[in-house]
Image: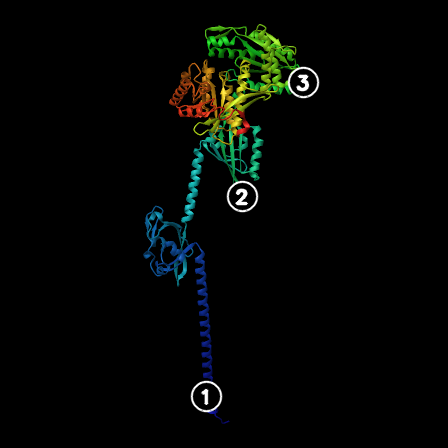
Amino acid sequence: MNGPFSGPWGVVSTVIAIVAIAALIAVLILLGKQRAQVRRANELLELSRELRHRYDALQAVTKEGVLVQSLSGRVLDISERAAAILGIDAASAVGRSVADLPVVLVNEMGLAMNPAAVLGHRSGVARAGWTVDSELVGVALPGTDTTQARMVQVASQLVPAGDGDAAAVLTTLVDVTGRREVEAALSRSEMQFRVAMENAPIGMALVDVEWRIVEANAAFAELLGTSVGALRGYRMEDLSTPEGRPAERLEVDRLLGGGQHRFSLEKRYQRADGHEVWVALDAALVRTPTGAPDHFVVQVRDSTESRLQAEMLTHRAMHDPLTGLANRTLLQEVLQAVLEQPGVVDRVAVLACDLDGFKEINDRYGHAAGDEVLVHVAGVLRAATARRGTVARLGGDEFVVVVQDLDGPRAVFEVASAIHAGLQEAVRVGRRRLNVAASIGIAIADPDSIEGGAPGLLAAADAALYRAKGSGRGRTEVYESSMTMGSASDLHRELAAAIAEDQLVVHYQPIVDLSDARVVGYEALVRWEHPQRGLLLPASFLSLIQEAGMSVALGQLVATRVVEFVASIHDRTRWVSVNVSADQLGDGEFATTLLAEISRHRLTAGRIVVELTESSLVASGTRIRHELTQLSAAGVPILLDDFGTGVSPLSYLRDLPVAGVKLDMSFTSGIPEDPTAGKVARALGALARELAMVTIAEGIEHEEQAEYLHRNGWRYGQGWLYGSAQPGDISR
């Protein structure tokens, strides 16, 4: 068959065609592979860009800085955070040797370090995945010294194929300056707390939520007579006496329950030696940030001394300081409480005892001898009573015994007989033996007498005492309803009832600054609101009160009322003066009452002033001087009243703690008509000013007197010109 592809040429042509087709196919296959490789390369490039983007994003938010370097120390990559920590530019750092980076590194001692030795390749970093121990270095930024270096934690790790086919070193940098400062602050705070706790003068302890001691200081251990080690693990409540544990447990449960944040208790603790001490326990609960209870901080202060002082003050307020017997206040409380019990008729009796001739002993042998006699008599009364009642000293040589017994009449007569028998033995005072006798009045509780309460029964015993003294003394009389008394005794009973029933009231006369007539204070003046006779002035009853031996009770009443009045005055600069006579001083009761009331109402002591009648101090003894010194030391100013009328004013100004004087109104009334009165007022004022004393003139009735006195140095004044004495509620 013949044709274009037949014969030899046909074969050749066919072969050429096949080869061309094969070549074309090969080209097409090669082009396909190239396109695939290009596409794969683009994909890898895109992936590389994405990974770089993620790496940069991660570095932007992480606190760690990353430095990648070759084993030869050339910087391959550095994150912005790492550059910021080192204080260098990231772009300029890439490609440079680590040793050439412009950084200053120091160790914790402040000595310079080689950057290549800290950040570069280290010998020993030879295995992939091996991390060099972290190292703390300081980075001093440009322009600062090494003392201001930031603290950086550096760690290195070998990364395989990190530099092409070669390994690279990955170094991480963490700025720990803030953390180190916080740790240092916490360490410093903990150290300060521990030092403060260990050296605190009061007991301190850390206690867990189970109320067990975790840590205690030396003061706490010393308070309990033990060691710090012995206290650890000890339950707090086991330290206290059994009766104090329930209240303590209740307070702890309240803290844990969220009812309160802290508590304070005064309680008794049992020491290791068996003795007990009073302590003030303060506990505060510390909670975790989530609000859960974590531990307690406890303070324990030894309050034994303050507790004893409080008990002593309470005892002093209720007892006679000379004899230790109950005073008038305690006696009336005891007697009233006894009379309020059922079935007291013929089971209660009151014995009033008054010494015969005691004034002569005082006058002849002095007050010291008189005090020894009173102490001896107090012992006789205690022994005679034999715990069948309460013995009290009301003041001076006046004693009262409240007898309680199933057979009251028999018991009270036995007590009276024992008193007379006990006083038959002479009292030894120094080298002298003094004979003492007593008159006794007895009142036995019956339906009529108990209606008047404690004042009524005391008045009945006093009436019987008056009869005993009037019948020859040294004897015993029993009160009976038919007993007739003189007018003085009737007034005595009325005055006793007046004190008990608040018939005695206090009025206040203003005291002004003579420079501008501004009221600066008041003088307290007692009045008697008599049920039948109306308002009585002091002249009509004060002498009877002194005669009846009720001066001390009156002084205590007035002191209480005045302090209450001062506490109610809105103007805290005003003060009130109280008149006190020698009869009301010497046994400590007035001073005790006044200072206790000042403390109870939290007044500044200078707002209460004591005025002494100069004429009543002519025979003042050491007891009176001691009581005045006690008041003055407590901040209560002492004024000398009726200045210029006594027999020895200069000696009083020298010997007594006097802070000021009051010019007697007899001199004021003569101004300006009487030249002598004016000269005396001027001279006395000059004397007082020379002694740096406060000056007050009383009895001012018109402006001429006020101007004259002010011109001659008298600072304050009072009298009808500025107002009369009025009830306390008018000036509050």
Q: Earlier in the sequence, mark 3 or mark 1?
A: 1
Residue at 39%, 56% in the rendered image: 82
Residue at which label 1 appears: 13
SS label for mark 3: loop
Q: Residues within 10 Å of mark 3 (few under 14, many from 20)?
A: few
Residue ID for mark 3: 343
Along the viewing direction, whichever of 240 and 46 lies nearer the viewer: 240
Q: Which amino acid, by three-letter code, is at mark 2?
A: Gly
Q: Earlier in the sequence, mark 1 or mark 2?
A: 1
- Which mark identifies residue 241? none
Q: Position of residue 532 (x, y in %)?
A: 62, 19
The number of numbered discs placed on residues in the rendered structure image is 3
Q: Amino acid at mark 3?
A: Gly
Gap in angstroms between the C-alphas marked 3 and 2: 61 Å
Q: Secondary structure at mark 1?
A: helix
Q: CA distance from mark 3 to mark 1?
A: 158 Å
> Which residue carries the number 2 mark?
291
Q: In which quarter of the view is residue 336 placed?
A: top right
Query: CB atoms at circles 1 and 2 under 8 Å apart?
Result: no
Q: Secondary structure at mark 2?
A: loop
